[in-house]
């Protein structure tokens, strides 16, 4: 069986927003609400994974001692 094309982060967010609106509406039957909730939690996990992967690719430019710029791996800085 061929693997389904992966959805983009933006596709996942759009679908997640649709699910949230349907659940907030309150008119969805319980069984369907549970299915939507499960789908939503899967989408949140997928979005988190995509963000983690993107973070690994981000490069931070900093000045080197000679006044030029150098690329260094992104390091998450806790601002708290």
Image: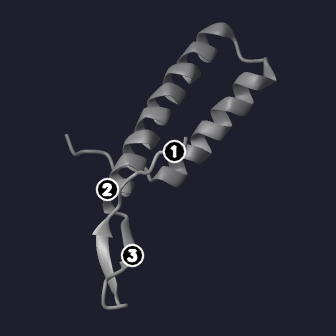
Q: From the viewer's perspective, is the residue at label 3 or at label 2 nearer?
A: 3
Q: How many marks?
A: 3
For label 3, the SS is strand
For label 2, the SS is helix
Distance from disc 3 to disc 1, alpha carbons, whole Å, reads 30 Å
Question: Quick check: 27 left or right of 45?
Answer: right
Above or below residue 55? Residue 30 is: above
Upstream in the sequence, badge 3 or badge 1?
A: 1
For label 1, the SS is helix
Q: Quadrant of the N terminus?
A: top left
Query: Which residue appears at 45% of the width and 53% of the height?
Result: 8
Badge 2, how many Cα within 10 Å: few under 14, some, many 20+? few
Q: From the viewer's perspective, is the residue at label 3 or at label 1 nearer?
A: 3
Q: Quadrant of the C terminus?
A: top right
Which residue carries the number 3 mark?
61
Query: Which residue appears at 46% of the width and 42% of the height?
Result: 47
Q: Front-most of 5 and 48?
A: 48
Residue 26 place in picture, x, y as percent:
78, 17
Residue 12 is labelled as 1
Which residue carries the number 2 mark?
56
Residue 18 place in picture, x, y as percent:
66, 37
Q: Front-most of 11 and 63?
A: 63
Q: Front-most of 11 and 4?
A: 11
Residue 70 is labelled as none
């Amino acid at each position: 069986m061929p693997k389904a094309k992966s959805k983009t982060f933006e596709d996942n967010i759009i679908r997640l927003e649709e699910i949230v609106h349907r659940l907030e509406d309150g008119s969805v039957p319980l069984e369907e609400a549970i299915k939507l909730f499960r789908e939503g939690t899967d989408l949140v996990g997928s979005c988190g994974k995509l963000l983690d992967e993107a973070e690994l690719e981000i490069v931070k430019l900093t000045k080197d001692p000679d006044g030029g710029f150098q690329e260094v791996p992104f390091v998450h800085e806790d601002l708290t």
